[in-house]
Amino acid sequence: MTQIQQTWTRHEEPFSKVVASVTDWDAASPCEGWSARDVLHHVMETERDFLGNQGHELPAAATAEDPAAAWREHNQAVTDLLGDQSVADKQFDGYFGPTTVGETLARFYGFDLLVHRWDLARSQGTDEQFTDAELDEIDSAVDGFGDHAYVPGIFADPVKVPEDTDRTTKVLARTGRKV
């Protein structure tokens, strides 16, 4: 397994576990105006759009009535693409400079799996925990996004939290999320 595949797996496995635990797809998520179903749809569609723009069309999930099944189908297709070195190593000029399809999936879309994993868990009334490494990754990504993180459609403005707040709350507050 390549480093890119390992990174993808490290992100998608806990995300997939949360997806499998969702019992109410119409429950409100922390993303304003979005249900759990909307969050999952966003994750799949942004990945599909990115891959399509790179010449790798993914079929729409055939099991739209069952979001968890749609995710499994979608995730398998993405995982299969990452297993193809000609896809993973394909270079392009990304928003932040030269990169590869694999690196973008593993890092940028992997970041998406981290924060939206929390959103899905919260929609179900559960509290998803992050490891220190995951919190480091979220923090580093937000630093790298800079002011671009707060353009419409990305994050809400950062939430002010007390200085003595736990690290998870502080890190998620940077993404406009209230814990």
Image (spheres, rainbow, N blue to C red):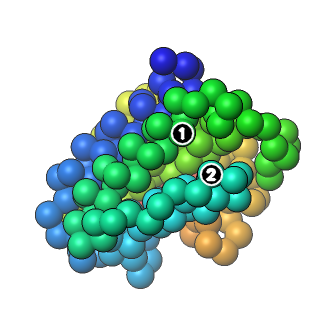
* Outermost residue to the left: 23
Query: Please, is residue 25 above or below residue 43 in the view?
Result: below
Q: Position of residue 79 (x, y in %)?
A: 46, 38
- The answer to whether residue 145 is visible is yes
Q: Return the x and y of residue 118 as percentages of the image width and height.
A: 35, 52
Q: Is residue 166 left or right of residue 126?
A: right
Residue 30: percent from left, percent from top: 38, 68
Q: Which residue is mark 2?
A: 56
* Mark with earlier residue (2, 1): 2
| Identity of the residue drawn at 56% across and 47% down | 109
Determine whether the residue tagged by mark 1 lies in a helix, strand or loop: helix
Question: In the image, is residue 72 above or below residue 132?
Answer: below
How far is mark 2 from mark 1, CA to CA? 8 Å
Q: Position of residue 29 (x, y in %)?
A: 33, 69
In contact (CB < 8 Å): disc 2 and disc 1: yes
The part of the image, by quadrant, that contains residue 41 is bottom left
Q: Which dot marks residue 23?
A: none
How would you rate the neighbour count of disc 2 (Cα within 10 Å): few for under 14, some for 14-19, many for 20 or more?
some
**Point 81% across, 43% down: residue:** 92
Q: Given the current orientation, which residue lies at the most extreme bottom position? A: 33
Residue at disc 2, secondary structure: loop
Q: Residues within 10 Å of mark 1 (few under 14, many from 20)?
A: some
Q: Find residue 3 and report its image quarter.
A: top right
Inspect this view and state whether residue 168 appears.
no
Q: What residue is shown at x 42% (from left), y 30% (from top)?
A: 10
Identified at 70% across, 58% down, the residue is 53
- 50 left or right, relative to 177: right
Amino acid type for the residue under numbered disc 1? Leu
Q: Which of 56/72 is in front?
A: 56
Mark 1 highlights which residue? Answer: 81
Q: Nearer the viewer, residue 19 or 71?
A: 71
